[in-house]
Amino acid sequence: MTRRLAPLILAATLLTGCGFHLRNALNLPANLGPVRVLASDPYSALAEDLANGLARAGAQAAAADASEGVATLQVVSEQWADTAISHDQFGRAQEFTLRYAVIFSMRRADDSVVVPQQAVELGRDYLASPVDSIGKASERELLVRELRRDMAAAILRRVDAASKPAAVAQ
């Protein structure tokens, strides 16, 4: 029993000693009010993920037709790119990098900037056998969903970081 418990206690001690801690929940500015997510594509899955994440963080959803007194998280653009990074002996691409870039900004209801316009780019590498086109498409679709989820989390973390008061220099 103690032989099993000793490594666990050692790991817990090392993790606390190195400064490891879980991320806190997303904190939005208290004076933010209702939030609307705008995207260039009205059917954007990223905009839906962002709206859901904001709702989980306690933000009030703004009415679709409301424009006054509403904070806005605007997704200016979304771009996807596939780049071949290796080829087989016949010149067919076998390995790809899937890149996802988003430009966004966030403003309060009074039009003051919460998060200035900025870009976030994520990427993943994947193998795609030239003879297995079905597997290639399904793996890529899985990566698209993962990247979209990760992008929403990255944007919400930036909103959270921007809403925290600046640390006082000592």
Image (spheres, rainbow, N blue to C red):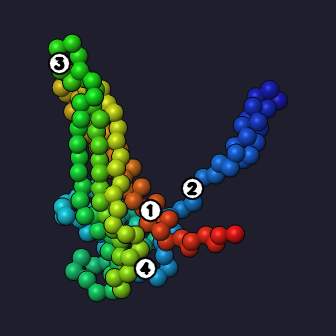
For image coordinates 82% across by 30% down, the residue present is: 2
Closer to the chain start, of discs 4 and 2, is 2
Q: Quadrant of the N terminus?
A: top right
Asked whether the viewer can see residue 71, the reply is yes
Element on which disc 2 rests? loop
Closer to the chain start, of discs 2 and 3, is 2
Which mark lies nearer to you, 3 or 1?
3
Q: Residues within 10 Å of mark 1 (few under 14, many from 20)?
A: some
**Looking at the image, do the residues carrying marks 4 and 3 touch, with CB atoms under 8 Å apart?**
no
Q: Quadrant of residue 95?
A: top left
Q: Position of residue 67 (x, y in %)?
A: 25, 83
Closer to the chain start, of discs 4 and 3, is 4
Compute the Cα span from label 3 to label 1: 41 Å
Residue under pointer 2: 23
Residue under pointer 1: 158
**Looking at the image, do the residues carrying marks 2 and 1 touch, with CB atoms under 8 Å apart?**
no
Disc 2 residue type (three-letter): Arg
Q: Position of residue 53 (x, y in %)?
A: 40, 62
Disc 3 residue type (three-letter): Gly
Residue under pointer 4: 32
**Looking at the image, do the residues carrying marks 4 and 2 touch, with CB atoms under 8 Å apart?**
no
For image coordinates 23% across by 21% down, the residue present is: 87
For image coordinates 57% across by 71% down, the residue present is: 166
- In-image side of 110 versus 135 (left or right): right
Compute the Cα span from label 1 to label 4: 15 Å
Q: Quadrant of residue 96?
A: top left
Relative to 95, residue 120 above or below: below
Disc 4 residue type (three-letter): Leu
Q: Quadrant of the C terminus?
A: bottom right
